[in-house]
Image (tube, grey):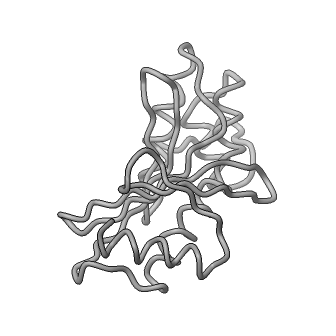
């Protein structure tokens, strides 16, 4: 295990999170529970490049027939998210939110890791209901983004492009 992974692991321990290794020494898994949902997160560490990737794995998967709509929704939503982005695996329908940080000195400090993790979890928590609506209804992706941004249904006069 490298120094960067050790610093990530220490962050989770200092925050009281139970982190478990995934497959190799390069990933940790933690569980998250918010007011809106429960899901798993994975921290992947690239020791060589000094990068920590943090993924929230959405507990909902897009069915094959909904993947085009959810992909459009996520791409439109990504245009207005400044820290992190949504991604989807087109083969499985798995949706993730990804943030990352660069650890130039080979380790992460608590504040930087906390900001990365908090922004990630907040974004998934904020938009998980929107994702569910797009997956389970026929709502147009542009309309769903407009509703997500304004909190009100679109009456047809305005659409987010």
| Numbered-mark total | 0
Which residue lies most toward the right here? 35
For residue 98, above or below residue 93: below
For residue 106, above or below residue 44: below
Q: Kindly identify the residue that appears in the image at 43 percent across and 53 percent down.
A: 85
- Residue 32 point in image, percent of width and height: 68, 57
For residue 129, above or below residue 53: above
- Residue 91 point in image, percent of width and height: 43, 20
Q: Kindly identify the residue that appears in the image at 61 percent across and 37 percent down.
A: 143
Which residue lies most toward the top here? 65
Q: Nearer the viewer, residue 141 or 134?
A: 134
For residue 32, above or below residue 77: below
Which residue lies most toward the left here? 48
Q: Nearer the viewer, residue 84 or 59?
A: 59
- Residue 134 point in image, percent of width and height: 64, 31
Q: Nearer the viewer, residue 126 or 158?
A: 126
State the image quarter where residue 1 is shown.
bottom left
Q: Kindly identify the residue that appears in the image at 58 percent across and 62 percent down.
A: 19
- Residue 135 point in image, percent of width and height: 65, 27
Q: Kindly identify the residue that appears in the image at 38 percent across and 59 percent down.
A: 53
């Amino acid at each position: 295990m490298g120094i960067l992974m050790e610093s990530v692991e220490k962050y989770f321990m200092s925050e009281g999170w139970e982190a478990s290794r995934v497959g190799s020494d390069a990933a940790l898994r933690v569980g998250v529970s918010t007011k809106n949902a429960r899901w798993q997160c994975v921290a992947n560490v690239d020791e060589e490049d000094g990068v920590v990737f943090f993924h929230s794995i959405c507990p909902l998967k897009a069915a094959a027939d909904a993947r085009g709509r959810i992909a459009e929704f996520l791409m439109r939503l990504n245009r207005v998210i400044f820290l992190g982005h949504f991604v989807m695996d087109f083969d499985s329908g798995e949706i993730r939110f990804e943030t990352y940080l660069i650890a130039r000195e080979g380790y992460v400090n608590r504040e930087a890791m906390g900001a990365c993790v908090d922004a990630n979890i907040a974004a998934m928590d904020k938009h998980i209901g929107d994702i569910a609506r797009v997956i389970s209804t026929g709502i147009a992706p542009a309309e769903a983004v407009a509703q997500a941004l304004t909190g009100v249904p679109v009456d047809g006069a305005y659409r987010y492009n």
